[in-house]
Amino acid sequence: MLQRYFRLTRMEFILYLREPSGFFFTLIFPLLLMMLFGSIWGNDPFPGENFGYIDFAVSAFIGMVILTSGIMGLTTSIAAYREKGILRRFKASPISPLLVLTAELSSLFLITVAGMILLLVAGALVFGMRFYGSILEVFLAFVLSTLSISALGFIPASLAPTARSGMIIANAMYFPMLFLSGAALPREMLPPFLSTFSEVLPLTQVIELLRGLWLGGHLWEFPVQIAVLCGVTVAGFAIAAKYFRWE
């Protein structure tokens, strides 16, 4: 069982890396944005603070990686497998369907980790990025954040009959969160009504949680964000389990 799991995870990981758009938007695009905005704003500490732009914004770029893999990657991948009949063949094979989905989720988690590592290495080497939190707490928040966004992505992935329809649904979820949560643009730039609306978006909670922990906060200081992300995780996987279609 474990051997099959690792083989499937490795296969899905390699297939994702071979997909140009998935590779670019998950691993390269957030890094390019960090380099662009970092070259504009630098990372000198803000007046009266001990952190600079990159220290403050790295959580947003990590959130972008989590969003891309959890929504775009997961939805389009599973929808494409359904359209091509691969899921139906998996269901009829000796391999457990749960094993297939777990391997898919694991491969996307590894991609997300790789994207985060690229951001952290670039931030440290190019901009002298500072870290004031607990590595363990940030990692636990990262895992929870990845699970919650992936659970959200499993909902359209469970229903979309084709890769094209999966892409349409994924885009409808992806771009509002990308532009309203603070991942691509600071929330302070939004008009009041959009800023208020953005507070209900899961990615907003992801970015606020990761930013708070990165700058020295602790998990117990963010009960709302943790509760929302836990709720999204449970609800997303529950809905996906109930309505998942193999063909």
Image (cartoon, rainbow, N blue to C red):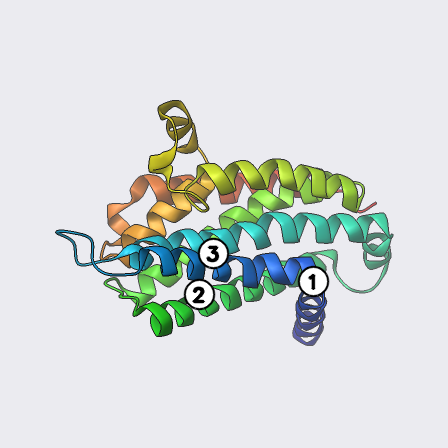
Name the residue type under label 3.
Answer: Leu
Q: Quadrant of residue 186?
A: top left
Q: Looking at the figure, which quarter contains the C terminus? A: top right
Residue at 38%, 30% in the rendered image: 195
Q: Which of the marked residues, 1 or 2, is nearer the chain's N terminus?
A: 1
Q: Where in the figure is residue 36, as x and y percent of width and height?
A: 44, 58
Q: Where in the figure is residue 201, as x and y percent of width and height?
A: 46, 36
Q: Nearer the viewer, residue 144 or 18?
A: 18
Q: Quadrant of residue 224?
A: top left
Left or right of 13 in this view: 50? left
SS for callout 3: helix
Residue at 57%, 58% in the rendered image: 26
Q: Is residue 192 visible?
A: yes
Identify residue for label 2.
Answer: 119
Q: Where in the figure is residue 80, as x and y percent of width and height?
A: 78, 51
Residue farthest to the front, as pictured: 40
Q: Is residue 237 visible?
A: no
Name the residue type under label 2.
Answer: Leu
How far apart marks 1 and 3 lie (CA) works out to: 18 Å
Q: Which mark is residue 33?
A: 3
SS for callout 2: helix
Identify residue for label 1.
Answer: 20
Q: Where in the figure is residue 133, as x and y percent of width and height?
A: 25, 62
Name the residue type under label 1.
Answer: Pro
Q: Looking at the figure, which quarter contains the N terminus? A: bottom right
SS for callout 1: helix
Residue at 53%, 36% in the rendered image: 176
Residue farthest to the top, as pictured: 193
